[in-house]
Image (spheres, grey):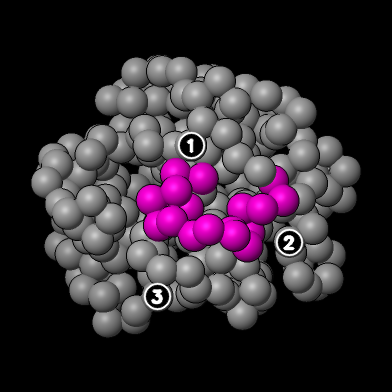
Amino acid sequence: MMKNILITGSTDGIGRETAKQLAEKNNRIIIHGQNINKAQRVKKELNKINPKVEPKITIADLESQTEVLDLAVKLQQEEEKIDVLINNAGIYKNKLEFTEEKIEKTIAVNYHSHFILTLLLIPLIEKSEDPRIINLSSMVHAHNLDPEKIWDPVDFNGSQAYSDSKLAIILFTFKLNRVLDEVSVNCLHPGVINTKLLQKGWGGGGLSVEQGAKTSVYLAESEQVKDESGNYYINKKRKKPAAAAYNKELQNEFWNKSFEMIKYQEILNKIPDRLIKA
């Protein structure tokens, strides 16, 4: 069965490779990126892989909460359903930078934009017969975080900000799994993969993007994980993340703080009430 799959950050690296591998399996890909030229290149690649299914391009800068809202509204207007959402996009910053909403950019892009996008798209995702949300984390996720200080760190360190954002996405995955009944929500470490992000943060090395896409593709496609939810995967196998990820009090506190950090009432108005009150 063909699935309608949105992949954030699918114009580069692991996201682009994930799009290609899922297109090969006869799925329709909604390409997301910041750059229209890159997105059009990926669309051409996907057309060659599977000429029968027309991919779609969506453009949004995940540093901007209003662009995330516009992306979600556009998809709600144009799509009947989303079967799989893969929250893949990520950045690494060597110095402290803030978004227009005064949020540190690493946490804004890697976590908070996906928090907002996912919650806005829940009504579309729930229309699928086999709805799945897949969040990309990392084995370098932090062992704890402060829900208050993460948005505006006192002593900024690029790798710490990245690690914090990757624990944030696991906390979100586990909380969302508790909130949603009929949707599979999982997260994963893709492996140490030779991407631009790895080169910027750690000087490169690592495995190929083909390897990096495998677990995302598995979680999007496999019948074996159809009813699996609330798990963290490495190399297609369930693993245990840091103990803090299982702390329900921390999950709840961070969930509530994530709503507080949404700066526009029009976004909150479009998120289902049951999620805000969860």
In this figure, which residue is indicated by the disc labeled 1?
142
The secondary element bearing badge 3 is classed as: loop
Of circles 2 and 1, the one toward us is 1
In this figure, which residue is indicated by the disc labeled 2?
261
The secondary element bearing badge 2 is classed as: loop
Quarter of the image holding residue 114? bottom right
> How far separated are the C-alphas under marks 3 and 2?
23 Å
Q: Give the residue drawn at x 83%, y 71%.
A: 265
Observer able to see residue 172: yes
**92 in relation to 43, above or below:** above
Q: Nearer the viewer, residue 244 or 195?
A: 244
Horizontal side of 183 relative to 43 (left or right) equals right
Residue type pointed to by label 3? Gln
Q: Give the residue drawn at x 71%, y 33%.
A: 250
**135 in relation to 233, above or below:** below
Horizontal side of 75 relative to 274 (left or right) equals left
Q: Earlier in the sequence, mark 3 or mark 2?
A: 3
Of circles 3 and 2, the one toward us is 2
Q: Which numbered marker is on residue 34?
A: 3
Residue type pointed to by label 1? Ala
Quarter of the image holding residue 230? top right
The secondary element bearing badge 1 is classed as: loop
Q: Earlier in the sequence, mark 2 or mark 1?
A: 1
Of circles 3 and 1, the one toward us is 1
Q: Which residues are magenta?
A: 147-164
Q: Nearer the viewer, residue 230 or 242?
A: 242
Q: Give the residue drawn at x 74%, y 64%.
A: 262
